[in-house]
Amino acid sequence: MRRGIGFWTGLSFTLLISAFLILPIFASVIAGVTANQFIGISSGFTTRWLLDVWANYGGTVLLSLQIAFATLAITLVLGVPAAYVLARHAGVTARLVEEAL
């Protein structure tokens, strides 16, 4: 199957944006585990930087995870029954609630 110019343009744009978003993440990870970020991987592997970050921000990371799990629990407790009710009672009110969400 032949694909038109629009497909290849869209694919190129998508890959370019994906690389723009993903490559800095890889660069940060590599900089975080190398002894000298300017030399790169050949300078050796270290966990010093990761331990420094954890020492400074470990409490913040744990608090963020607690908030995320609490939000997940609340969403499951409230959202699943609400979705069930909306699916079972398809009426004007259910459609209005769906549109509001």
Image (cartoon, grey):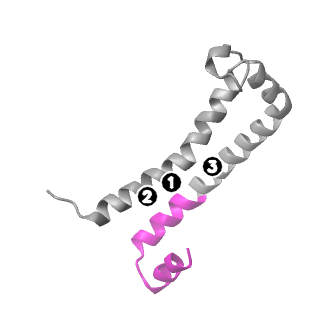
Tell me, yes or no, whether the two marked residues, 1 and 2, touch with CB atoms within 8 Å. Answer: yes
Q: CA distance from mark 2 to mark 3?
A: 38 Å
Give the number of the mark in front: 2 or 3: 2
Residue at the left extreme of this rendering? 1
Q: Position of residue 4 (x, y in %)?
A: 23, 64
Q: Quadrant of residue 77?
A: bottom right
Q: Main secondary structure of the magenta part?
A: helix
Residue at image position (36%, 56%) is 11
Q: Is residue 87 magenta?
A: yes
* Element carrying mark 1: helix
Q: CA distance from mark 1 to mark 2?
A: 6 Å
Residue at image position (51%, 46%) is 19
Residue for badge 1: 17
Q: Nearer the viewer, residue 72 or 23?
A: 23
- In the displayed structure, does residue 46 sit left or right of residue 79? right
Residue at the bottom extreme of this rendering? 92
Q: Position of residue 53 (x, y in %)?
A: 79, 29
Q: Quadrant of residue 100?
A: bottom right
Span of residues in magenta: 78-101
The numbered mark, 3 or 1, whose residue comes first in the sequence reads 1
| Amino acid found under the numbered disc labelled 2 | Phe
Q: Nearer the viewer, residue 4 or 59?
A: 4
Sort mark 3 into few (<14), some (14-19) or many (20+) by Cα contacts within 10 Å. Answer: few
Residue for badge 2: 13
Q: Position of residue 34 (x, y in %)?
A: 68, 20
Q: Which quadrant: the C terminus?
A: bottom right
Residue at the right extreme of this rendering? 56
In the displayed structure, 1 sits above or below 86; it is above
